Structures are given as C-alpha cells and as structure tokens.
Amino acid sequence: GAVVSQHPSRVICKSGTSVKIECRSLDFQATTMFWYRQFPKQSLMLMATSNEGSKATYEQGVEKDKFLINHASLTLSTLTVTSAHPEDSSFYICSARDRLRTDTQYFGPGTRLTVL
Amino acid sequence: AQSVTQPDIHITVSEGASLELRCNYSYGATPYLFWYVQSPGQGLQLLLKYFSGDTLVQGIKGFEAEFKRSQSSFNLRKPSVHWSDAAEYFCAVGAPSGYSTLTFGKGTMLLVSP
C-alpha cells in the first residue's frame, strides 16, 4: 500500500517551454501533497505544500508564478514549470500524505527535468 | 526552528559488517522521526518511523533505529549490511502533530565494499 507515482520519470525540453509533472496517490487519498526539488548530491528542498481544493503554500524563495501547482482531486497533484530555463533542471519529487493517516509522507519516484 | 544533522556524508562498510548511521535533531519537543532511503535516480522509500512508545523501532529490510531523547539522536542500524543496501539515507523530522512538513538532513551515502 501507500504507492505514489509520478509521470513522466524523465523529460527533456527546450528553454522557454512549459512542462507538467503529475503526482498520483494510487491506493490512498491524499488531502496534502508536497513538492520537493533535489539538486545533485544534496538533500530535498521543500518547494510547496498543496492541499486538495485550495491554493498551494510556497516556501520562501520559490516563485509561485513559475512553479504552478494544482491539486484538483484527492489523488492527483500537478506541478507545471512555466517558461523553463536551464537552471530549472533538477530532480523533482512529490510526496503525499494519507488522508486517514496523516503522520507519514509517501514519496514518488521522482522526475528528472532537463532544460536545454 | 527544527534542524537535522547527519554528520557523515559518506560511509563505507564491508558487506556483512554492521552499520550505524548517525542522526541528531534540534527541536523543542520530541518530534516525529523518520529514516528514508534513496537509490540513485529514485524517490524516497520509508524505512522506519518513530512517533512515541518503545524507543527501539524496527523497519523494513532489517533496519532498526533507536531514539535517545537525552542525546537528541535517532541513529539507524543494521547488523549485517548487504551490497544492495548501498544508497543514500536521509533522516527527517516533523512536528508531532502529524500535519507538518518534514525537515531533512543532508543525507549519508552508504557504500558497501565486497
């Protein structure tokens, strides 16, 4: 149980384009999902917290107009990187918190974004 | 503010030897404590967690961790390491309400030598 998927696993795009990453909780309902960014050989940095049906809460320094988050259902959250630039290249990981068991986050496998 | 320190960036252990990965935290009360493992290019897998009660917690893959309040530590252990354990290990803390975000340590890379 407690499986989280992400799609795509890898994406390469040209500078200036937008990329959408999906995060799904497959066998549980997630009222809260989290988006992290991980640079090579570094820890996870929380970007934003999204709650189903409401606006995401962004961490300090994260541009909300650049990283659009939508959490339209209890099993799906999306992160859209708008007008991507090479410095946005990174490993993006989502996690989801079970609606019924709020004490643990379950992580997706991550999405490797490369912006050329 | 809460923080997590994993003092070892890299650790190399011989296959079959015992392992201990250190984690110290700073928090006003006893937080929720977690250990996650990340294989290269993958997401994080939960190994174990501590919320309350018995200070020695058992996790998956033969791992265990001990919460020591007096030392603000939550060290991860395994009696006999397998080559497949080579990965990055992250310690994390969260507020005991269960509704908070997680703060991660910088991670410890475990290398297993034959």
Image: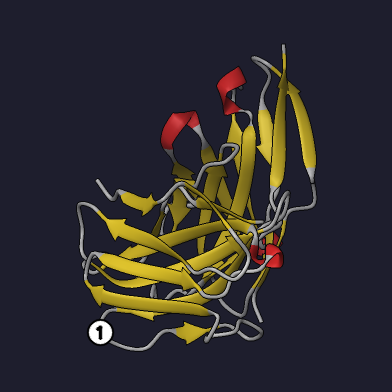
Compared to A102, does B63 lie above or below? Answer: above
Q: Quadrant of the N terminus of chain B?
A: bottom right
Residue found at x 53% / y 85% = A64
Compared to B29, does B23 lie above or below? Answer: above
Residue A103 appears left or right of B61: left
Residue found at x 69% / y 50% = B107
Residue A92, visible in the rendered structure: yes
Q: Quadrant of the C terminus of chain B?
A: top right
Residue B30 appears left or right of A40: left
Q: Quadrant of residue B37?
A: top right
Image x and y of residue A112, in percent: 55, 50
Residue B80, visible in the rendered structure: no
Q: Quadrant of residue B19?
A: top right
Image x and y of residue A80, in percent: 45, 71
Q: Nearer the viewer, residue B36 or B49?
A: B36
Which residue carries the number 1 mark? A53
